Image (spheres, grey):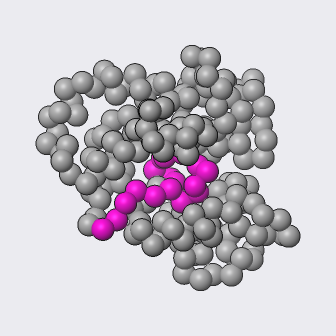
Amino acid sequence: MQVFGRLTVDSVEGSRAHCTCACGTKRIVSIYSLRSGNTRSCGCLARERTANMGRSNKTHGMKKTRTYKAWESMRRRCFNPRAGNFKHYGGRGITVCDAWASFENFLADMGECPDGLTLERNDTNGNYEPSNCCWATPVEQTRNRRITATIEIDGRTRVLGEVCAERGVSAHLVHCRLRSGWPVNDRLFMPSLRTSLGA
């Protein structure tokens, strides 16, 4: 039995783990997120941190910026059952990594939101965490939902993030290669030269 933060792994299926949180909530989490430390609870830890932050988020002076609004919207659709699009996010198990309960941590990881871009997950079945998020144009977001959320490989339709996790390569790297027109073959999943050299 493995424990990661508040999550206890009940079973493993492919690159995903079925977990029970200390609060009693059951969640399906990517194994990469557990091992990297990006996910350590069902989301309850992040909610507690947000509640305890209180004055902190009111004093950073960025509440009216695009970046803060993106962070706020991300958390609303994952944690607020009354949000109109909750069923597509929190309602199907998508959550936010614990570190991003803090806007300051989100800002440090993502940088400020450039004009015309919005927050996007490379693997649309994955959580909001540094390894799975980028700033993207609306066109790129649409393309991601239509094309790269799943991928046809070895005669089967697979979730891109799961294939990348199995092959030990960054989903963000493969996502960018697909955007650049790379064909779907073994070369697509080769690690970058920087990674292979241990840089």
Q: Quadrant of the N terminus?
A: top right
Q: Is residue 136 magenta?
A: no
- Residue 161 in the image: above or below residue 97: below
Write the residue at 33% across / 22% down: 51
List x then y, in percent, for residue 89: 53, 43
- Residue 164 seen in render: no
Instruction: Give coordinates of residue 38: x percent, y percent.
Output: 51, 40
> Is residue 138 rendered to the left or right of residue 145?
left
Nearest the camera: 74 or 168?
A: 74
Q: Quadrant of residue 33?
A: top right
In the displayed structure, 127 sits above or below 155; it is above
Quick one: which residue is furthest to the right in this view?
155
Which span of residues is magenta-colored? Answer: 116-132
Q: Is residue 116 left or right of residue 98?
A: left
Residue, x 14% and y 34% (percent of image)? 59
What residue is rendered at 55% in x and 66% in y? 144
Q: Position of residue 79 (x, y in %)?
A: 46, 33
Tell whether 33 sits left or right of 13: left
Relative depth, front residue between 57 and 36? 57
Does the magenta-highlighted stretch encompass residue 119?
A: yes
- Any part of residue 176 in sight: yes
Q: How many marks?
A: 0
- Quarter of image, res 149: bottom right
**43 sits left or right of 111 in the view:** right
Q: Position of residue 94 (x, y in %)?
A: 56, 41
Residue at horizontal 48 percent and vertical 44 percent from the top: 85
